[in-house]
Structure formats: structure tokens, C-alpha cells
Image: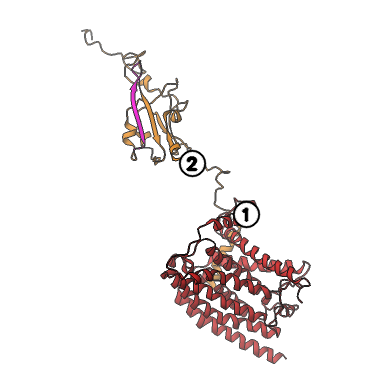
């Protein structure tokens, strides 16, 4: 009997306690910089697309929500002809970001992507591409990779040693 | 004692009771939220007050479906009974001097009789639904309400003995010197518990028991028929709170403020207490409920009645 009265009293004391509800649309929650939300495609510091259309993200994706088609420009740079993420399937696991060799695909702390039509959740490349390098400001894949493209020969990449001339006998 | 404009007070009490009952849904959700450290509905209108209106519009738009296996006339009648019986009890409720529909000299008995009739609603709803869970809920309701009604009536007889009348305005006037809650504290506690059981509110909500019986007797109901059970339940809460105020806490009596404000304040206090009890207490097992009613509450009510009778006899 006493314990019943006690529990009534304790519940009553909650009148004076702070409420735990976050009034969401007015009061935004804190999202960590590494929060896994909407997926973007980032660019090099000089403005070129980072994505080299290697398909690793599409392979890593557990729900197969990424579709892309590789192609090459006149300089020999690979890039995706189209890049499509179906966000109605995406589970925001971040495996695509982990798989990406060029830091192109990244997850951002934004989750407010509600739509009235499901079709609007399919994002094309122009929806995904942002005008910036995202989380890796200084990184430029084509500048550090040892791949030869138009305007950059072998040995011209950063920290790359000039290739050995195997036809010369000099040490 | 009755009002000079009878129709006006009929309309006032009728609309007042229905409005209070409707907004109790909002109040209950807000208060429960407060005691659970949440906010509750606070989006529709100021403080979420228009939530009731939104819910009302929604519930009227719902499909009004009668299951093909149900006993149709009884199924439709059942939700109406509870609202009608509870609303009729308001006819004898003295809100303030002059605001009273009918000063019956057996007012208290009238209320008790109508609250007994209210059981039919629940039992018939459970029976006509032709559904195991609904039937179980209806049977529990019948057993619970009949056993708690016995000492509900007995717990009030102390008040009747002290006031010397069954008429509710006379009972209020008899408390001008001392509220009956002091000489009749045991009676008050017993009536509070019995009232909870009569309105089937949470510690005694075994007829509904969401966690075991789906929704008990109103499992098969939808749309406004379902809504009627809730209007009936909240009307019942209002009525029992008002009855506690009238019988034990001096009704409209109080200093400074006008009588109707005192009445509403006291009633609101007990409504809030009902909601607090719902927020704090778990549901007992059914056999615990029954043995409590018959083995503890009933003897206590009898002892209360006998002692009060002896004291009143010795006093006069």
C-alpha cells in the first residue's frame, strides 16, 4: 500500500523535471561530422570530378542502390557517364564511402530528404555532385596517381619518381 | 434550488460536460506526457488544444464498419448506452447554486442506478461483437463493475447518514462547516477506488487490457462508435470527479472565488488525480482485483457504514 502511494508521488515529481523530447523541426539535433546521411559525389580542389567509375561502391553496396556507367574523356580520364543512387533503397551503411579509392563518394550529416513521390528519391549525378572536395580538402586523385592521362605523363605525379629508362645502361 | 432558466442550465451542463469530456482526451495526453517527461500533442493549435478537433474530424471520416458476424442492433446500441447513462447522471449534479437541472430527492441513488446501467453498454458491446477477446473483456467488465458497485454504494452511505439526505444540493449545503472528507476519509478512499473501477480507468482497466485482450470489449469497434466509448469514458471520469467534489469536498463551497469556479477547480483536481493514477499504477491481476473488491473493500465499507451509523446515533 505504501509503495503504491510512493510510486504515485514519484510519478508526480516528474512534473518538475526537464522533458527529454527534442522539438525537432524547430530544434535541430546535433549531428556529428561523421554522421552517415545523404550521399554526395565530391570534386577535386581544381573542380574536376573525383569519381573514376571503378564500380567498387556499386559492388560494396549491400542493397544494390548504386548504378553507374563508366566512360572516358579525351584526356583518358575515367568518369561515370551516369551515376544514380536510389535513396529509397539506401540504408546509409557507408560501405560505398569505405570502398571508394578516390574519396569521391561521401556521406554527409543531412537526413532531411523526405519526398511525396518515391521516384523523387532516385538521385542522378547532377543531384549528387557538389562543388567542393567534401571531407578531404587537399586531395586530388589524378595528381597523386601514377596513371598517365592527357597533360600528365608518367613520373609527373606528386611524389612520383621519374620512370627508369630501361634502354639506358647508365646506373 | 433549481435554476430560474431551466433550459439554459440543461444546455450549459450538457455542452459543458461534452466539451470537458472531449478536451480531457487532450488533457490526459498532455498530463501523461508531462509525467513521462515528454510533451504530448502540442502542434495543432495553441498548446495542441485543437488536437481534439483534428481527431474528431478524422474519426468522423473513418469507415463505419459493423462486422458481418456481429449482432447488429445490439452492436450499434451498446456505445450509445454508455454516453446516455453517464449524461443522464449529470442531470442531478449540482454545479453551483442555481446551476442544476433537477433537484431529485434521491439524486445520489439516481447516479448509482445509472452507473449500474452503464455496465450494460460494456457487456453488450463485448457480447454482440462475437469475438473472444471482446467477450472476455465484457465478462471482466461485468464482474468487476458489479463487485465494485456494491461497496461504491455502501461507501457513500456514510455521507448520506451525516447529511441526512440523498439530495445532492442538500449534501453540499451540509458541508458548510466541515467537508465530509474529514469525518468520512475512509469512505472517500473507498469511493475513489470504486469510481476508478466504475470508469474502467487504468489500475482497473482489465475490461480493455490492451496488452492481453487487444482492446477488450471495443476490439471490433471503429469510427465514431469507438469514439463514443471514449466520450463515455471521459464523461465518466468527469462525473466521478464531480461526484467526489460534491460528496466529499464541499461542491461549490469555498471562499472568495465564485461557486462555479470552486466546483470546476475541485473537479479538475480529481480529474488530474485520475490521470496521475493512470500514469503511475500498473494493472492488477484479475483474481487480485476480485479478491480486493470482495475481501478488503467491501468489509471496510461495511465497517465504515456501521461506525458512522453508531456515531451519528450516539451524537443525536
Question: Does residue B36 sit above or below B125 in this rendering?
Answer: above
Give SS at disc 1.
loop
**Subunit under mark 1:** B
> Disc number at residue A89?
none
Rendering coords of residue B153 (x, y %): 60, 82
Taking depth in this image into account, of B231 and B68 the one nearest to the observer is B68
Circles 2 and 1 on the same subunit: no
Please give the name of the residue rendered at 41% of the width and 70% of the height, measured from the top-left corner.
B132
**Subunit under mark 2:** A
Chain rendered red: B
Chain rendered orange: A
Question: Does residue B277 sit above or below A89 in this rendering?
Answer: below
Q: In the visual, does A54 lie left or right of A32?
A: left
Q: Which residues are magenta?
A: A64-78
Give SS at disc 2.
loop
Rendering coords of residue B167 (x, y %): 70, 81
Rendering coords of residue A94 (x, y %): 38, 37
> Disc number at residue A116?
2
Please give the name of the residue rendered at 61% of the width and 62% of the height, measured from the top-left corner.
B22
> Disc number at residue B50?
1
Taking depth in this image into account, of B221 and B212 the one nearest to the observer is B221
Q: Quadrant of residue B135?
A: bottom left
Measured in 3D between alpha carbons, the distance from the residue under mark 2 to the one under mark 1, in whole angstroms, is 26 Å
- Taking the magenta stretch, the answer to whether it contains residue A127 is no
Amino acid at each position: 500500500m505504501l509503495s503504491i502511494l510512493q510510486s504515485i508521488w514519484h510519478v508526480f515529481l516528474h512534473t518538475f523535471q526537464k522533458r527529454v523530447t527534442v522539438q525537432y523541426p524547430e530544434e535541430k539535433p546535433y549531428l556529428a561530422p561523421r554522421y552517415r546521411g545523404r550521399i554526395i559525389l565530391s570534386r577535386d580542389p581544381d573542380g574536376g570530378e573525383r569519381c573514376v567509375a571503378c564500380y567498387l561502391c556499386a559492388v560494396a553496396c549491400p542493397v544494390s542502390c548504386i548504378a553507374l556507367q563508366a566512360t572516358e574523356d579525351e584526356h583518358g580520364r575515367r568518369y561515370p557517364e551516369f551515376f544514380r543512387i536510389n535513396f529509397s533503397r539506401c540504408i546509409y551503411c557507408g560501405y560505398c564511402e569505405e570502398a571508394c579509392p578516390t574519396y569521391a563518394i561521401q556521406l554527409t550529416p543531412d537526413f532531411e530528404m523526405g519526398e511525396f513521390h518515391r521516384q523523387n528519391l532516385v538521385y542522378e549525378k547532377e543531384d549528387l555532385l557538389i562543388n567542393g572536395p567534401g571531407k578531404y580538402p587537399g586531395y586530388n586523385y589524378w595528381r597523386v596517381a601514377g596513371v598517365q592521362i592527357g597533360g600528365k605523363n608518367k613520373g609527373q605525379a606528386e611524389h612520383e619518381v621519374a620512370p627508369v629508362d630501361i634502354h639506358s645502361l647508365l646506373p | 434550488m433549481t435554476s430560474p432558466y431551466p433550459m439554459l442550465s440543461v444546455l450549459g451542463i450538457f455542452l459543458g460536460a461534452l466539451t470537458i469530456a472531449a478536451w480531457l482526451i487532450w488533457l490526459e495526453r498532455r498530463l501523461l506526457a508531462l509525467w513521462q517527461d515528454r510533451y504530448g500533442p502540442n502542434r495543432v493549435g495553441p498548446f495542441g488544444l485543437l488536437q481534439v478537433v483534428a481527431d474528431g474530424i478524422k474519426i468522423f471520416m473513418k469507415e463505419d464498419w459493423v462486422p458481418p458476424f456481429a449482432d447488429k442492433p445490439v452492436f450499434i446500441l451498446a456505445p450509445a448506452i454508455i454516453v446516455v447513462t453517464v449524461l443522464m447522471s449529470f442531470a442531478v449534479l449540482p454545479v453551483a447554486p442555481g446551476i442544476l437541472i433537477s433537484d431529485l430527492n434521491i439524486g445520489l441513488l439516481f447516479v448509482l442506478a445509472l452507473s449500474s446501467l452503464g455496465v450494460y453498454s460494456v457487456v453488450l458491446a463485448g457480447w454482440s461483437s462475437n469475438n473472444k477477446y471482446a467477450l472476455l473483456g465484457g465478462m471482466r467488465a461485468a464482474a468487476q463493475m458489479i463487485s465494485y458497485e456494491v461497496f461504491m454504494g455502501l461507501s457513500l452511505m456514510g455521507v448520506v447518514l451525516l447529511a441526512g439526505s440523498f439530495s445532492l444540493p442538500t449534501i453540499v449545503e451540509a458541508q458548510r462547516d466541515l467537508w465530509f472528507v474529514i469525518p468520512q476519509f475512509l469512505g472517500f478512499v473507498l469511493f475513489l477506488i470504486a469510481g476508478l473501477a466504475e470508469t474502467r480507468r487504468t489500475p482497473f482497466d482489465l475490461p480493455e487490457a490492451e496488452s492481453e485482450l487487444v482492446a477488450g470489449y471495443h476490439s471490433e469497434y471503429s469510427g465514431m462508435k469507438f469514439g463514443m466509448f471514449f466520450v463515455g469514458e471521459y464523461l465518466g471520469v468527469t462525473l466521478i470527479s464531480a461526484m467526489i467534489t460534491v460528496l466529499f469536498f464541499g461542491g461549490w463551497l469555498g471562499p472568495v472565488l465564485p461557486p462555479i469556479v470552486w466546483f470546476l477547480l475541485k473537479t479538475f483536481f480529481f480529474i488530474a488525480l485520475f490521470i496521475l493514477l493512470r500514469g503511475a499504477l500498473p494493472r492488477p491481476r484479475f483474481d487480485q482485483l476480485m479478491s480486493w473488491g470482495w475481501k478488503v473493500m467491501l468489509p471496510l465499507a461495511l465497517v465504515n457504514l456501521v461506525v458512522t451509523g453508531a456515531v451519528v446515533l450516539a451524537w443525536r
